[in-house]
C-alpha cells in the first residue's frame, strides 16, 4: 500500500505541476514571441537605416565623382602629356597650349580658342550623372588633345589620306554615316569625321598604340588606327 500511495502521490504531484506550469508556458511563449518579434523589427529597422545611410553615401559619392577638382585636372593632364611624349606626338608646336580648370561652364568646354578648358561642373558631366554614366577625365583630355593636334598639324589632317581613313573632311562637321560598331569606336565618333578622329586618337593613347585583337578584325577601324600611327611617325620624324 505504501508503494501504491507513493505512486499515487507522485502522479498527483505531476498533474499539479502540469496544471501550474501550463499558464506559465503560455505566458513565456507569448513573451518570447513578443521579444522575438521586437528583435526582428529592431534588426530590420537597423538594416533599413544602414541601407539608407549607405544609399545616401553612394548618392553623395556619385555627385562628387562628377565634379572635377583642380587636382583631378593636374593628375590627368600629367598622365596624358606623358602618353603624348612616349607615343611620339609631342613637339614644340604644342608647348604653348594651356589646360584651364574653370568653376562651371555649359559652353566653354574642351578645345576652345586655342586652349583646353575643363570646368568643374559642366552640362556633359551633369548628363553623365543623370544617365548613370561616368567618363574618365583622362579620356576627355586625350580627345581634346586630338583636336589640338589637328589644329597644329594641318598639313597632316587636311589631306586625302585623312579623308580616305575617316570618310570625309576634318572641317566639314557633317555626319558621315550612322553609328556602326564595325566602323566606329563610340557613338559620338559617328557624328563627324573630326570627332571620329578624336575618338580613335583617345583610344590610341589609352591603349599605348596597341590595337586589340577584337578591333584588329575590323578593317575600317584598322585603317583609322593606321592613320594615327602614321601621324605619330611623321611628327616624331620632324622633331
Image (spheres, rainbow, N blue to C red):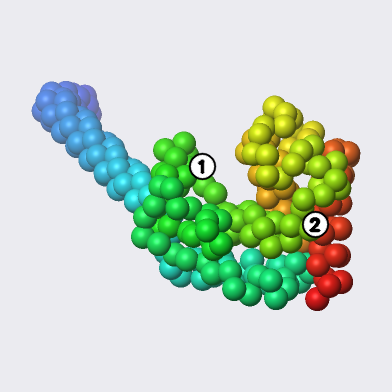
Q: Give the number of marks.
A: 2
Regarding residue 205, the answer to whether it shows in the image is no
- 56 left or right of 39? right
Q: Above or below — where is 148 with respect to 60?
A: below
- The residue beneath circle 1 is 133
Mark 2 and 1 residues: CB-CB less than 8 Å, in contact?
Answer: no
Residue 80: horizontal and vertical position, in percent? 64, 66
Q: CA distance from mark 2 to mark 1?
A: 34 Å
Residue 103: horizontal and vertical position, in percent? 36, 60
Q: Residue at x 67, y 32 (%)?
A: 175
- Depth order, front residue of 126/13: 126
Tell me the element at label 1.
Answer: loop
Quadrant of the snapshot with the C terminus: bottom right
Q: Quarter-wise, where is residue 153 in the image?
A: bottom right
Q: Above or below — where is 167 with respect to 86?
A: above
Regarding residue 90, the answer to whether it shows in the image is yes
- Depth order, front residue of 41/205: 205
Closest to the camera, between mark 2 and mark 1, is 2
Quadrant of the snapshot with the N terminus: top left
- Depth order, front residue of 170/49: 170
- The residue beneath circle 2 is 156
Q: Residue at x 42, y 44 (%)?
A: 123
Tell me the element at label 2.
Answer: helix
Residue 214: horizontal and vertical position, in percent? 83, 42
User: What is the crowding at mark 1: few (fewer than 14 residues within 10 Å), some, or many (at least 20)?
Assistant: few
Amino acid at each position: 500500500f505504501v508503494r501504491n500511495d507513493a505512486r499515487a502521490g507522485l502522479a498527483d504531484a505531476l498533474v499539479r505541476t502540469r496544471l501550474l506550469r501550463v499558464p506559465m508556458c503560455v505566458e513565456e511563449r507569448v513573451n518570447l514571441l513578443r521579444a522575438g518579434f521586437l528583435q526582428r523589427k529592431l534588426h530590420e529597422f537597423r538594416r533599413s537605416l544602414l541601407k539608407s545611410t549607405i544609399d545616401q553615401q553612394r548618392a553623395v559619392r556619385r555627385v562628387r565623382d562628377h565634379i572635377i577638382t583642380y587636382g583631378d585636372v593636374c593628375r590627368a593632364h600629367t598622365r596624358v602629356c606623358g602618353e603624348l611624349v612616349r607615343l611620339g606626338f609631342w613637339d614644340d608646336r604644342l608647348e604653348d597650349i594651356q589646360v584651364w580648370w574653370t568653376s562651371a561652364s555649359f559652353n566653354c568646354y574642351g578645345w576652345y580658342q586655342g586652349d583646353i578648358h575643363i570646368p568643374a561642373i559642366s552640362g556633359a558631366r551633369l548628363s553623365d550623372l543623370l544617365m548613370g554614366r561616368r567618363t574618365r577625365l583622362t579620356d576627355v583630355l586625350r580627345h581634346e588633345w586630338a583636336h589640338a593636334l589637328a589644329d597644329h598639324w594641318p598639313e597632316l589632317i587636311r589631306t586625302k589620306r585623312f579623308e580616305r581613313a575617316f570618310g570625309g573632311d576634318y572641317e566639314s562637321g557633317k555626319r558621315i554615316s550612322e553609328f556602326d560598331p564595325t566602323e566606329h569606336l563610340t557613338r559620338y565618333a559617328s557624328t563627324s569625321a573630326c570627332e571620329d578622329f578624336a575618338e580613335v586618337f583617345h583610344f590610341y593613347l589609352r591603349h599605348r598604340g596597341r590595337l586589340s585583337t577584337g578591333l584588329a578584325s575590323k578593317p575600317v577601324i584598322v585603317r583609322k588606327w593606321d592613320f594615327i600611327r602614321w601621324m605619330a611617325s611623321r611628327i616624331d620624324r620632324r622633331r
